[in-house]
Image (spheres, helix red, strand yellow):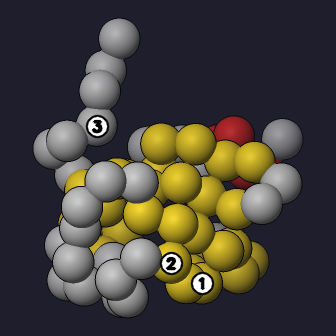
Amino acid sequence: MLDDRLIKTVFTLPTQDSGEIQLYGIFYHYRVVGVAKPGDQVVVVAADRSGLSVRKLGSELDF
């Protein structure tokens, strides 16, 4: 599934808490998990039917 391939994709956060971002020609809704401000680099940590969950780069957990 294309959405699962977006996990670990990095982009610059355009808005504070949630919004819409175009990745690979497709618009996705996203929501920020944790604390991040516009201009921060964020990474996609989850993708589901409601959109992408992103977290500030450097604060994601790797297992």
User: Quick check: can you spot residue 14?
Assistant: yes
User: Quick check: can you spot residue 9?
Assistant: no
Residue under circle 2?
Answer: 18
Residue under circle 3?
Answer: 60
Q: Does the residue at mark 1 contact the one at mark 3 (Cβ under 8 Å)?
A: no
Residue under circle 1?
Answer: 20
Crowd class of label 2 (few under 14; some 14 to 19; many from 20; radius 10 Å)? some
Task: Find numbered disc 3 in the image and state the secondary structure of the residue it sits on.
Answer: loop
Q: Does the residue at mark 3 contact the one at mark 2 (Cβ under 8 Å)?
A: no
Crowd class of label 3 (few under 14; some 14 to 19; many from 20; radius 10 Å)? some
Task: Find numbered disc 2 in the image and state the secondary structure of the residue it sits on.
Answer: strand
> How far apart, in angstroms, are the residues tagged by discs 1 and 2?
7 Å
Q: Does the residue at mark 1 contact the one at mark 2 (Cβ under 8 Å)?
A: no
> How far apart, in angstroms, are the residues tagged by discs 1 and 3?
21 Å
Residue ID at (41%, 77%): 17
Q: Position of residue 30 (x, y in %)?
A: 57, 69
